[in-house]
Amino acid sequence: MLIDDIDFASLYQQQLQLAGRTEKSPQHWDAKAEKMAANSANQTDSYLTQLLAKIDLTGAQSLFDMGCGPGTVALALADQLQQVCGVDYSQGMLDVARQRASQQGINNTRWERRAWEEGWDDLPRCDIAVASRSTLVADMRDAMSKLNRQARLRVYTTHLVTPTFMSPEIQYALGREVVELPNYIYALNVLYQMGIQARVDFIRGRNCQQDNSTFARFEENVKWTLGTLSDEERARLDHWYHQRDPATIAPATRDWALISWDAVPNS
Ligand SMILES: C[S@@+](CC[C@H](N)C(=O)[O-])C[C@H]1O[C@@H](n2cnc3c(N)ncnc32)[C@H](O)[C@@H]1O
């Protein structure tokens, strides 16, 4: 078999299905909005600092931030641009983004409630399009194509490097099956098969906001990523935790791949 015989867009969908990944509802994200805003306001947010350093704003006046969450990227770049547009399907995230913009005295923002899967024809085309940590979409080809159409100059997207959000060791400890999600390599190949030769860079995590010094904190960190735990899972996690030095525990992966390209007309 040759590489061109592989349809990476279908392979991506197959991997998502194998992972048993269910579509998250906007309400799932509403509940996370405040905490995510607190994390991104944190000056030591090394992810955001590294990402901003890699976004080239040369010649750009506007930004389209898809899956903007609490305005993480849009607000951080607003003072360097004339207009930023944050788009998300979670009303809770957009409310927090709007509130943060007003607290920071930023008034060149526009917030739109929209899903990846809906039509974007009425949304503004911008010089730069970003999708930061919001790319675990149902249809990668469609998503990348929409983002490419939305940008006049350049597109920046970040994707998982490893195929799990939570370390397999902890998923085993809970008695769960390890779920392997499609990582960045799928997106890169989907783009290649769309005729887009993208650049790849990496954002290295430092686990800086992970405090696992008590079981209660550790449990919160695990639940942030995996959701509610059953009584049995909680007991298994408690047992696992107390057999270790908390300083050596790193439950969630924090590395991201940054895939970027110059906008290509008609892709
Ligand atoms: C992990 S957060 C990332 C937020 C922000 N971009 C950042 O990097 O901090 C993922 C965001 O994608 C949004 N999202 C997830 N699925 C979506 C979909 N199908 N359509 C639109 N937004 C979606 C969520 O509501 C959430 O705000």
Image (cartoon, grey):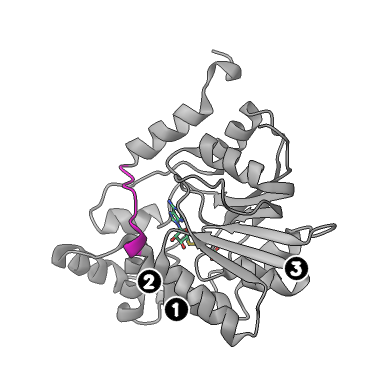
Q: CA distance from mark 1 to mark 2?
A: 8 Å
Q: Which residue is mark 3?
A: 82
Amino acid under disc 3: Gln
- Residue 89 location, x and y as percent? 43, 58
Q: Which residue is mark 1?
A: 211
Please identify the dominant SS of the magenta region.
loop
In the displayed structure, would residue 59 be above or below residue 73?
Answer: above
Cα separation between marks 1 and 3: 38 Å
The reply to whether callout 1 and callout 2 are in contact (CB within 8 Å) is: yes
Kindly check if marks 1 and 3 are in contact, taking CB atoms under 8 A apart as contact. Answer: no
Magenta range? 20-28
Q: Tell which residue pokes out farthest to the top in this image.
A: 1
Nearer to the camera, 251 or 140: 140
Q: Secondary structure at mark 2?
A: helix
Instruction: Name which of mark 1 and mark 2 comes first in the sequence.
Output: 1
Q: Tell me the residue that label 2 is attached to.
A: 221
191 is higher (above) or lower (below) than 96: above
- The x, y position of residue 242, in whole percent, is 29, 74
